[in-house]
Image (cartoon, rainbow, N blue to C red):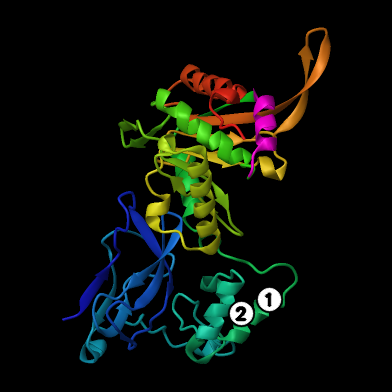
């Protein structure tokens, strides 16, 4: 009897996923533990493994189709079942009338046609949406030249938003649609912190310093260090701090667990490890799951202030602008100070502006007095 391979729940927070590439075709032999597909869930790529020996009978879900965990993704069975389990073919198109024989029927779209491996790889390398490609091979099969024809056109080739951006596009839209987001901004003086940072060896990044400081401040602001599930708000006494990492065509948010309990050196080391894994594509679902608060740092790209979007199911996110010199009154004269703009976006359903402003005030006070917490060098 054909066996269903289900979408695993690789982490507690994983609710759904999507096949980004099938590595097996009907009739292929598979071995227990062999990779049969690539799956995207929680913004990271994972491998779907066969859980028994047999023959790949057919896929039950299409590439890029978003499905809940425990959904049957494909069938594995015996060669004898391959014939009996073959998917029903679409109804044959009616024969053309005499008046229409002067124009050949259009070849089928990729959703109905076979695709050669070389054509599929070329399309993936260039981000081309195969669903919009009409094949010129036998029976409408998409061949390499069909994809190359798109590369020869003027301008960049078209691509699928879903393929290129994955789940992030959907998550951002859901976040804006289902939450009442409000952003507060505040300039924070880090002049003294800049002096400490300049003397540090190795020199920590601004994101590391401010992220670590948040780990110390957030436990006093549990309404903002929280997640929402339906109508239930879950404050967290532990800070599991997510931080946005920009890749070539998407954004991932690794999570530094128990950031409130780490030393600055351990926090910096853990952030570097997760960043390296994000850029090498080796993050696991558990590395991005369970965050209680997120930081997005665009200061290194010359941005002063912006409006970050809450990363659901979290309640709040802090955007970091660049550290810059500003003129400030100093007695009867003017002094140059080092400042950055913090942009705090939060879910107004959960809390109000004053508690959010108090978090920014506490963070500003903490960062302004680094001598009380930053190790001497």
| Pointer 2 residue | 147
Residue 321 magenta: no
> Height in image: 100 above or below 326?
below
Which segment is the magenta one?
Answer: 188-201
- Percent x, y of residue 35: 37, 76
> Height in image: 162 above or below 136?
above
- Residue 180 visible within the image: no
Q: Dot 2: within a 10 Å radius of its alpha carbon, few (fewer than 14), some, or many (20 or more) residues?
A: many
Quarter of the view holding residue 143: bottom right
Residue drawn at point x = 44 percent, y = 78 percent: 112
Residue drawn at point x = 37 percent, y = 53 percent: 286
The alpha-carbon separation of the residues under discs 2 and 1 comes to: 7 Å
- Percent x, y of residue 344: 55, 30
Question: Is 15 left or right of 151, judged from the image as shown?
Answer: left
Q: Which of 130 and 262 is in front in this view?
A: 262
Q: Do the residues labelled 2 and 1 touch (CB within 8 Å)?
A: yes
Q: Dot 1: within a 10 Å radius of its alpha carbon, few (fewer than 14), some, or many (20 or more) residues?
A: some
- Percent x, y of residue 369: 59, 22
| Pointer 1 residue | 151
């Amino acid at each position: 009897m054909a066996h269903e391979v289900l979408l695993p729940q690789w982490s507690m927070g994983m609710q759904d996923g999507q096949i980004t590439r099938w590595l097996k075709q009907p009739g292929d032999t598979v071995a227990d533990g062999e990779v049969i597909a690539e799956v995207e869930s929680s913004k990271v790529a994972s491998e779907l493994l066969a859980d028994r020996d047999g023959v790949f009978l057919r896929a039950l879900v299409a590439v890029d189709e978003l499905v809940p965990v425990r959904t049957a993704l494909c069938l594995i069975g015996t060669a004898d079942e391959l014939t009996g389990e073959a998917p029903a073919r679409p109804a044959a198109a009616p024969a053309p009338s005499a008046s229409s024989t002067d124009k050949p029927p259009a070849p089928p779209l990729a959703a109905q046609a076979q695709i050669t491996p070389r054509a599929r790889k070329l399309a993936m390398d260039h981000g081309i949406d195969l669903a919009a490609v009409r094949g010129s091979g036998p029976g409408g099969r998409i061949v390499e030249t069909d994809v190359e024809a798109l590369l020869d056109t003027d301008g960049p080739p078209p691509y699928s938003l879903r393929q290129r951006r994955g789940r992030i596009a959907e998550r951002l839209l859901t976040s804006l649609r289902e939450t009442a987001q409000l952003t507060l901004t505040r300039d924070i003086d880090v002049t003294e912190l800049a002096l400490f940072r300049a003397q540090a060896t190795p020199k920590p990044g601004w994101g590391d310093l401010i992220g670590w400081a948040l780990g110390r401040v957030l436990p006093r602001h549990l309404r903002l260090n929280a997640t929402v599930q339906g109508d239930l708000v879950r404050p967290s006494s532990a800070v599991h701090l997510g931080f946005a990492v920009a890749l070539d065509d998407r954004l991932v948010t690794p999570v530094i667990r128990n950031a409130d309990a780490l030393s600055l050196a351990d926090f910096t080391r853990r952030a570097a490890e997760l960043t390296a894994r994000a850029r090498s594509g080796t993050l696991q679902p558990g590395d991005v799951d369970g965050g209680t608060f997120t930081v997005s740092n665009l200061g290194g790209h010359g941005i002063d202030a912006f409006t970050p979007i809450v990363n659901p199911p979290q309640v709040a996110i802090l955007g970091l602008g660049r550290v810059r010199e500003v003129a400030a009154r100093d007695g009867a004269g003017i002094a140059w100070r080092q400042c950055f703009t913090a942009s705090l976006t939060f879910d107004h359903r959960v809390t109000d502006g004053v508690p959010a402003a108090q978090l920014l005030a506490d963070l500003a006070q903490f960062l302004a007095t680094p001598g009380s917490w930053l190790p001497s060098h």
